[in-house]
Image (cartoon, helix red, strand yellow):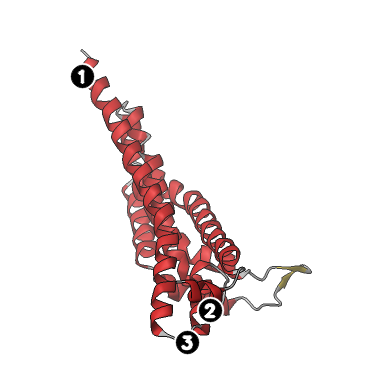
């Protein structure tokens, strides 16, 4: 392990942590924009109008089926790097391109979870509606895992740092160890996040059960 650490250099960990922060930045952008797009669709899907429900279901289905890589490379190539609007640069950064490519997933997830939350709220189960929060937190961590797609367009995030460093290692064994380090570094915060989600869901479920039991 020591020769491997020497080859990685003292700047590897800071660079990798900076790359991981980009993964979380991408996920945050994708989920925030997804909420803005998905919640109106959830409200439309929970309406009483058949036409509105049909349109919302069609849009949600299209977003759910949108391949992330296709959307990403479409955005990468459709807007020129020197594009301007009224003299203002409008070219998208690599981080924003990846975030927008993940918006269809997060928006569809927000719409599905939002419909359930609206139904719970209308039935008077406000605690049940709060399950929307752990559901969206789960979506956030799923998007963090998916944000590694940014490596395909040269965005310096955690996966790309690992891949670039692996190219400098001469042995397969060293590369496998490096990949294992990357899995652990990503896996620990993600597993902690999923554990928090499970705890929050159980806590809300327990509160709902107690409330139902105490209601005459």
Report, in whole angstroms, how far the alpha carbon at label 3 lies from the one at label 2. Answer: 13 Å
Q: Which residue is mark 3?
A: 170
Q: Residues within 10 Å of mark 1 (few under 14, many from 20)?
A: few
Q: Count of labels shown?
A: 3
Residue 105, image quadrant? bottom left
Please state which of residues 159 and 144 is positioned toward the viewer in this rendering. 159
The answer to whether 215 is drawn above or below residue 20 in the figure is above
Residue 192: x and y, percent? Answer: 39, 48
Residue 191: x and y, percent? Answer: 37, 52
Task: Determine whether the residue tagged by mark 2 lies in a helix, strand or loop.
Answer: helix
Q: Which residue is mark 1?
A: 213
Q: Which residue is mark 2?
A: 164
Please state which of residues 98 and 11 is positioned toward the viewer in this rendering. 11
Labels 1 and 3: the sequence-earlier one = 3
| Residue at screen point 44% across, 74% down | 69
The answer to whether 168 is drawn above or below residue 20 in the figure is below
Residue 105 is tagged as: none
């Amino acid at each position: 392990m020591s020769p491997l650490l020497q080859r990685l250099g003292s700047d590897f960990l800071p660079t990798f942590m900076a790359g991981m922060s980009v993964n979380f930045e991408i996920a945050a952008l994708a989920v925030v924009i997804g909420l803005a797009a998905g919640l109106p669709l959830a409200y439309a899907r929970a309406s009483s109008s058949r036409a509105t429900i049909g349109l919302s279901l069609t849009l949600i289905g299209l977003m759910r089926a949108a391949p992330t890589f296709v959307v990403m490379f479409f955005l990468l190539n459709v807007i020129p790097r020197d594009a301007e609007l009224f003299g203002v640069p409008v070219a998208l950064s690599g981080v924003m391109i990846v975030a927008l490519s993940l918006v269809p997933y997060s928006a569809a997830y927000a719409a599905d979870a939002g419909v359930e939350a609206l139904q719970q709220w209308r039935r008077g189960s406000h605690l049940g509606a709060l399950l929307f929060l752990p559901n969206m937190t789960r979506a956030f961590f799923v998007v963090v895992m998916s944000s590694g797609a940014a490596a395909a367009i040269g965005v310096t995030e955690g996966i790309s740092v690992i891949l670039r460093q692996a190219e400098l290692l001469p042995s397969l064994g060293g590369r496998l160890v490096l990949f294992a380090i990357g899995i652990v570094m990503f896996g620990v915060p993600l597993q902690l996040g999923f554990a928090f989600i499970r705890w929050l869901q159980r806590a809300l479920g327990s509160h709902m059960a107690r409330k139902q039991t105490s209601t005459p």
